[in-house]
């Protein structure tokens, strides 16, 4: 699917660029052609205004190409109408030699007079003409169009070369842009497939337990159904409910649904309450909790959601911290931010795993049954931090693993 999307992106870019280049080149070609025709027409008008001797002596009768003036071959003819209906033609000037009383001249004049127009072209001889009626006779001026056509062909050849080079360059750029533009889509597609696979895996276990216990309850012959079977059903149903709620929280975050109620919150008080709640849990796990909280750290946020973030970080430290190692909760205030850190000693997390800690259902130890939870806590915490215009990041080295939450201070 991603490959098809990239191909469509490149195709759309190339079609649009080709259309734009075609419009630009066609406009430039039409403008150049019109300018050349105007110049040729001015040459003809100048020739008609001047006498043959003056016209022959002027060196500037030609096509002005900007950097140079190209002399245009031309000739003038006077046509006298006879009483018998025939006409007599006399070449009165020009750059053509040996044109008088030739079949070519007769054919040119016949074609010109048959068009019955003041100006036009004789395509069979590549000539442009202009007629001037002087009553008793008509004066005709002809100029060769070969130079016009050669200039236009040269211009079109240059345009085609420039267009081809531009399209090749833009094709490469479009391919790179397509890969860059579809990278988030590819990542989201991959995460969605992984999410569905992991969610199915997490739901499979409790559903299996519930179905097994339900079958045992139905098949048991005892008058009093064993309470532990119903407790198992209740426990696994509660586990499924928690998973669905966490998935719903992440779905709302993905859809940019703002659920936090923003108010002035003392982050110091929220952190102290969370630490007080987790002290017994940490003590029972043999991992004492130590706190170092700066006073009067105020932020704008949702108290319950901020409490949830800190609780997730503390719960993660209790689960995965080294046995006997102390968990440290630290809160500091800078000029613009509140910085809350939860650290626990333990084996360092490799960098390739550290960057994936906030992926859904991911666990650095690749275990799914040794620890409780679904691997959605850290993604939820990161989503809440982003909703509060903050950030959550992880660091790990030989001394400890640290989760750092930064939030903007209340102004």
Image: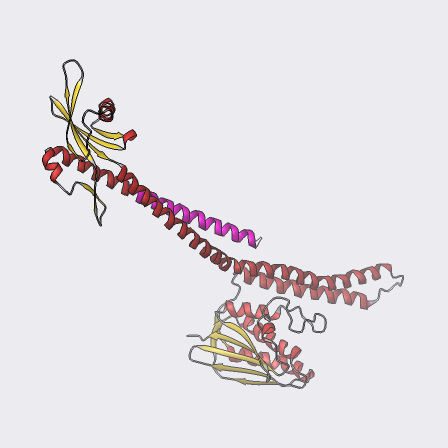
Q: Kindly give the residue lying farthest to the front in the view shown.
A: 98
- Quadrant for the C terminus, please: bottom left
Residue sitting at 24 percent across and 30 percent down? 120
Determine the image quadrant of residue 201. bottom right
> Does any portion of residue 27 appear in the rendered image?
no
Residue 37 x/y as whole percent? 24, 38
Question: So how many labels did they put on this image?
Answer: 0
Residue sitting at 84 percent across and 59 percent down? 218
Front residue of 192/179: it is: 179
**Magenta stretch: includes residue 15:** yes
Front residue of 187/259: it is: 187
In the rendered image, the vertical position of residue 154 relative to residue 179, given as above or below: above
Please state if 65 lies on the left or on the right of 392 as rendered: left
Colouring used for the render: secondary structure
The secondary structure that dominates the magenta segment is helix
Residue sitting at 14 percent across and 35 percent down? 47
Front residue of 198/138: it is: 138
Front residue of 176/408: it is: 176
Q: Kindly give the residue lying farthest to the top in the view shown.
A: 84
Residue 53 x/y as whole percent? 10, 35
Residue 143 x/y as whole percent? 21, 34
Determine the image quadrant of residue 86. top left
Residue 269 x/y as whole percent? 53, 79
Magenta stretch, residue numbers: 2-30
> Does any portion of residue 232 appear in the rendered image?
yes
**Magenta stretch: includes residue 120:** no
């Amino acid at each position: 699917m991603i490959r098809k999307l990239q191909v469509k992106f490149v195709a759309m870019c190339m079609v649009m660029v080709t259309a734009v280049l075609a419009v630009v080149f066609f406009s430039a070609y039409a403008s150049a052609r019109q300018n050349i025709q105007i110049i040729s027409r001015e040459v003809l008008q100048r020739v008609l205004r001047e006498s043959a001797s003056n016209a022959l002596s002027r060196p500037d009768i030609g096509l002005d190409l900007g950097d140079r003036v190209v002399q245009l071959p031309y000739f003038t003819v006077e046509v006298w109408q006879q009483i018998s209906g025939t006409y007599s033609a006399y070449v009165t000037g020009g750059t053509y030699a040996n044109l008088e009383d030739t079949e070519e001249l007769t054919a040119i004049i016949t074609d010109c007079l048959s068009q019955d127009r003041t100006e036009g072209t004789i395509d069979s001889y590549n000539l442009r003409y202009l007629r001037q009626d002087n009553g008793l006779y008509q004066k005709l001026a002809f100029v060769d169009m070969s130079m016009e056509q050669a200039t236009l062909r040269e211009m079109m050849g240059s345009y085609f070369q420039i267009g081809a080079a531009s399209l090749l360059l833009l094709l490469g750029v479009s391919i790179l842009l397509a890969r860059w533009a579809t990278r988030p889509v590819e990542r989201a597609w991959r995460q969605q497939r992984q999410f569905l696979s992991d969610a199915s895996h997490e739901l499979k276990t409790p559903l299996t337990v519930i179905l097994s216990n339900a079958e045992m309850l139905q098949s048991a012959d005892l008058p009093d159904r064993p309470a532990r079977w119903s407790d198992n059903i209740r426990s696994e149903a509660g586990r499924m409910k928690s998973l669905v709620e966490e998935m719903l929280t992440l779905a709302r975050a993905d859809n940019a649904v703002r659920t936090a109620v923003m108010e002035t919150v003392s982050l110091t008080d929220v952190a102290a309450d969370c630490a007080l709640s987790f002290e017994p849990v940490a003590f029972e796990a043999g991992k004492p909790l130590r706190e170092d909280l700066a006073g009067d750290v105020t932020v704008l946020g949702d108290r319950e959601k901020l409490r949830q973030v800190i609780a997730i970080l503390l719960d993660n430290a209790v689960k995965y911290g080294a046995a006997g190692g102390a968990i440290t909760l630290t809160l500091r205030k800078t000029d613009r931010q509140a910085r809350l850190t939860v650290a626990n000693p333990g084996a360092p997390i490799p960098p390739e795993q550290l960057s994936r800690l906030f992926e859904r259902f991911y666990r650095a130890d690749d275990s799914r049954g040794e620890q409780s939870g679904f691997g959605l806590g850290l993604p939820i915490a990161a989503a809440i931090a982003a909703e509060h215009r903050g950030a959550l990041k992880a660091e790990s080295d030989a001394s400890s693993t640290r989760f750092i939450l930064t939030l903007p201070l209340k102004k």
